[in-house]
Amino acid sequence: MKNSVGVMLVPFLFFCLMSCLNQTTDDISVSSPDSALKLKFHLKEGRPYYELMYKSDTLINLSALGFELKEQPAMKGGFKILDTEISSHNENWQMPWGQNKRIVDNHNLLKVELQETSENPRLLTLYFKIFNDGAAFRYEFPEQKNLKEFVIMDEITEFNINGNPDTWWIQADYDTYEKLYQKTTLHDALWVATPVTMKTVNNTHVSIHEAALTDYAGMTLKQTRPGVYKSELVPWANGDKVRCSAPMKTPWRTIQVSPNAAELVESNMILNLNEPSKIEDPSWIQPMKYIGIWWGMHLGTEIWHAGSRHGATTQNTMDHIDFAAAHNVQAVVVEGWNAGWENWGGKDAFDHVTPARDYDLEKVAAYAKEKGVMIIGHHETGGDIPAYEHYVDSAFKQCDKLGIHAVKTGYAGGIYPRGEHHHGQFMVRHYRKIVELAAKYHIVLDAHEPIKPTGIRRTWPNMMTREGVRGMEWNAWSEGNPPSHTVTIPFTRGLGGPTDYTPGTFDLLFKDCGKRVPWNTDRLEITRTHSTLAKQLANFVILYSPLQMASDLPKNYEGHPAFQFFVDFNADVDESKILNGEVGEYITTVRRAGDNWYLGSATNEKERDFKVDLSFLNPGSKYKAVVYKDAPDSDWKTNPYAYEIDEIEVDAAASIEIKLAPGGGQAIYFVKL
C-alpha cells in the first residue's frame, strides 16, 4: 500500500500516519481531527465495507458498499486495492449569507482506489471525509476504457446502525416531504426520507442524510433487516435509478454525529461537502423579510385566479407594498398574479409571463420600486416541467426587466411527463437548471415542493430557501401541526438547510380573517394554529430562513404591539448558537445580526422553565432586552393569545429565566446600547 500526502492547506497530521501503520491493504482507518470519530474501511474477499466508531461506541457496524448496473455486471465485489491516500484539510471560508457566515472546514480524507480483478476490470474510487461533527463518503467512477455510459439500478450503500436508538422520521415518499415526524425505535422506522435523526442509549445524536445532490436520484433509506438501512434511490418512470457516464461522482452520504441535540443543529458539515460558489460576485444576493398574498388563499377567504375573490389584484398588492414599506419589511410575494390558475390541474395550464386580467404587473413593479420594496414573483408549475421550461427564460427576463429579483417556484401536483417523480434524477436536473438560469438573471429562489436541501446553497447561493416540510398552511385546512412539530424541524429537516415554513400567524384561531369558503377540507371548525402567540415570534428565530415570512394577513399585524419583534428582526444574520434543546421537546436559539442578537425559545405540549446565561453577548457591552413572553395563564389550547412584553438591561454576565407555556415560546431582541 502506498501512503501519500495530498497538497492541502495544513501539514499532514502525525496521527493520520500512525493510523495507517501495521495495517494490511484490506483494512484501513482514518480518524477525525479531534480523534473522537474513527472510520474503518475493509475489503473482505473483494467486497468493500466500512464501519464507524464514536469515542468508545460503535455507531455503524460493518456496512456494504457497491452498485447494481443495468445490463452490466454489478460493481460490488471482486475488487483489489490499487492505492490509498490519507490527507488533511483545515481552512476558514465565508458564506455570503447563512446561519453562520464564517465556516470552518477541518477534516481528514481517505481515498481508496479499487480495481476489479476480472478480465475487463473497471475502476471505482471511494472518498471518506471525517470531520469532528461527522463522517461522509462518496463514490467516483473515474474515466476508464471499460466503463463509459451506464445506468445504476441499485446503490448498495448500507448503514448498519448499532443498537435500536430512538428515531425521528417521516415515511419515504418519492414526491413530498410534507409529513409529520414520528418518534419510534429504529426498528419501527422501516422506510424513511432523509435527514433521519437518532439518539443512542448514550445520548449520542446521529443524522443520516446526503450532500451535494447533483445529477443523481434522491436517496431514501429502507431497512433490509432490523437496523440495517440501505440506500433506495428514487427511480425514473422506466425504473432506472441514475443515468450517467464516467467520469462522475455521486452525492456524499453523510453521518452527522454529536454528543447532544444542540450541537447536531450547529454542524456545518453538509455545507462543507459542497463545492465553492460558482457566483463570483454574490453581492446582489441579500436576505430579506417578506409578507405576501398567500395566506388568504389557504384560509379560503381569497382565491388564486381572477374573479370576485381574487387575492392578487393590483390594489391589494399595492396595499401590501405600503404595509411592507411602513414596517421595515423588504419584500412582498404575490401568488396568483399570472394567467392560468383557472386551469389548475390541466396540461399547459400556466403562463408565467402574462398577468391575470385584474393585475397590472408593470404598475405594481413600478410602485414597489418607488416604495423600496422587492416584489417576489411566483411561478407555480403544477408539476408541468416541459411547459415551465418553455416559459422560464422569458419569464426570468421579464423579472429582470421589472426589477423582480426574487422568485418563489412551486411544483404542486404530479410531475409531467407522467411517471417521473419530484425527487428523481429527472427533477434534480430540472431544479438545478432553474437555479443556474436564475443566477444568470440575478434572481434568488424560494422553491416549494422541492428536492430536499443538501447544501447546494454554497455552490449556488441564490438558492436561498425552500419548503420541503409540512408548513404553516397545513394549519389552515387540516388537523394542523402539533406543538411538537416546530421543535422537531430544527433537528431533522432543518439539518439539510434553510426552511421556508412561513411562520408568524397572529390570528391563531382564524377568528378575524373574514368569510372562509372550504376548498381543501370540509371541517373548517377543527382548523387553527397550534401554538401561543409568543411562540409564533420565537419561530422567526428558530426556523431559519434567509427569506423569512410573516405569514398572516397584514390587518392582523396592524397596530399589534407584538409585531414590533418582526419589524426589528434582521434576516441577515452573522452567527447562530443553540443554547439548549431536545428533539421534539424544546429548543433555544440565538442569532446575531451586526451588534444585535435575537433569541427564540419554544416548547412542545409541555410547559418548561429554565435559565439561560447570556455569555454569547459581547463582553463589556450593555444591551436592552425586549422580551416577548407567554403570560402566566397562557396555554396553546385554552388561552393562546396571552402574552407580555418586558424591557430589561442585561450584559454577558447575566442570565434570563425563560418560562414557556404549554405549546408556548419566548422571543427576545437584544439591542446593543
Image (cartoon, rainbow, N blue to C red):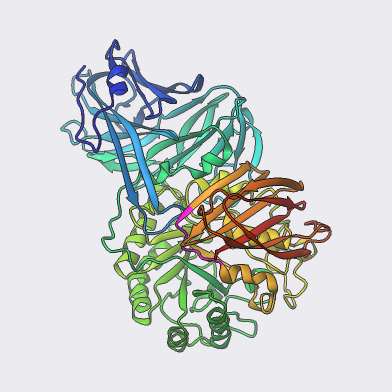
Quadrant of the image occupied by residue 397: bottom left
Which residue is depicted at the point 56% across and 25% down?
A: 227
Magenta-colored segment: predominant secondary structure? loop
Residue 227 vs residue 33, the one in the foreground: 33
Image quarter hosting the N terminus: top left
Q: Is residue 127 at all visible to an observer of this figure?
A: no
Image quarter hosting the C terminus: bottom right
Residue 262 vs residue 410, the one in the foreground: 262
Image coordinates of residue 289 in percent, x first then y, are 52, 69
Image coordinates of residue 579 in percent, x first then y, are 58, 45
Residue 16 vs residue 651, the one in the foreground: 651
Residue 136 vs residue 300, the one in the foreground: 136
- Left or right of residue 562: residue 214: left
Is 78 part of what is drawn in magenta?
Answer: no
Q: Is residue 574 above or below residue 556?
A: above
Q: Quick one: which residue is furthest to the front in this view?
A: 620
All told, the count of numbered labels is 0
Which residue is depicted at the point 37% across and 59% down?
A: 96
Image coordinates of residue 71 in percent, x first then y, are 31, 32
Which residue is depicted at the point 63% across and 51% down?
A: 654
Q: Start and end of the magenta stretch?
A: 569-575
Quadrant of the image occupied by residue 125: top left
Q: Is residue 541 at all visible to an observer of this figure?
A: yes
Q: Quick one: which residue is furthest to the left in this view?
A: 145
Image coordinates of residue 561 in percent, x first then y, are 69, 73
Q: Is residue 625 above or below residue 113?
A: below
Quadrant of the image occupied by residue 394: bottom left
